[in-house]
Image: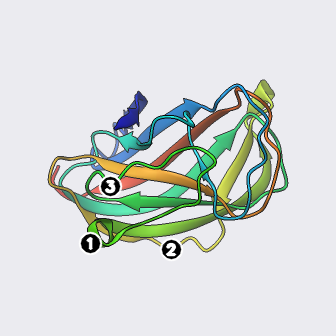
Amino acid sequence: MATATNTLTQRSAANPGSVRSVSGFTRPDDTNAYADNDVIYESTGTAGVMKFDSCGVAGTIIHVGISMADIKAVDLDLIVFDQEPTGQADNATIAVGSADINKLVGVFSLTNSNKKLGATGLALYEAADGRAMCYTSDNGSLYGVIVARDAFTPTAECAFSAFLHLQIDDV
């Protein structure tokens, strides 16, 4: 199974336990429409998940977001796991099996915040409810799957980047 590999971790100098872990991918070179509950990922042929590194073995997810290079009026979910779940393929209906239920940390519902990230033209999708979720991780990583909550037609090779703002307990 593949995991998205372009990750970045930023640690706050003022608060070493405050971490922003980022994982991203570029979706396939097609404009196949997504339906409600379809997975958005980098490959239609290979199942996978996003991997967030340097999350520590325990902490709290304080804030989540997704930037997308294709500005759409669409709602998204970021499903977060504390162990690597079964991979999900692009444009397939999300399927969290019984083997993955105990790995589930939570589901974050995100909407277009109408914020643009500088001059990049990227749209920022953020969780509206502001709730925090605690987690533990055997290997210091968390995993994520982006799911469309509305039908939409994407731009080919659209870049997605998801971030987790964490307060790590084990620093």
Disc 3 marks which amino acid? Pro
Q: Position of residue 127 (x, y in %)?
A: 62, 64
Tell me the residue that label 2 is attached to: 131
Query: In whole angstroms, how far apart are the C-alphas of marks 2 and 1?
Result: 20 Å
Q: Quadrant of residue 7?
A: top left
Residue neighbourhood size for the residue with mark 1, other residues' Cα within 10 Å, grouped as few (<14), some (14–19), many (≥20):
few
Identify which residue, 91 or 169, lies in the foreground: 91
Q: Do residues under tags 2 and 1 come within 8 Å of each other at their CB atoms?
A: no
Q: Position of residue 143 (x, y in %)?
A: 37, 50
Secondary element at image label 2:
loop
- In the displayed structure, 152 sits above or below 32; it is below
**Residue at left offset 73%, top offset 36%:** 117
**Residue at left offset 33%, top offset 56%:** 167
Q: Quadrant of residue 135?
A: bottom left
Query: In whole angstroms, how far apart are the C-alphas of marks 3 and 1?
Result: 10 Å
Tell me the residue that label 1 is attached to: 102
Query: In whole angstroms, how far apart are the C-alphas of marks 3 and 2?
Result: 23 Å
The N terminus: image quadrant: top left
Q: Earlier in the sequence, mark 2 or mark 1?
A: 1
Q: Is residue 161 left or right of residue 1?
A: right
Label 3 or label 2, whichever lies nearer to me, is: 3
Identify which residue, 24 or 122, lies in the foreground: 24
Disc 2 marks which amino acid? Arg
Tell me the residue that label 3 is attached to: 85
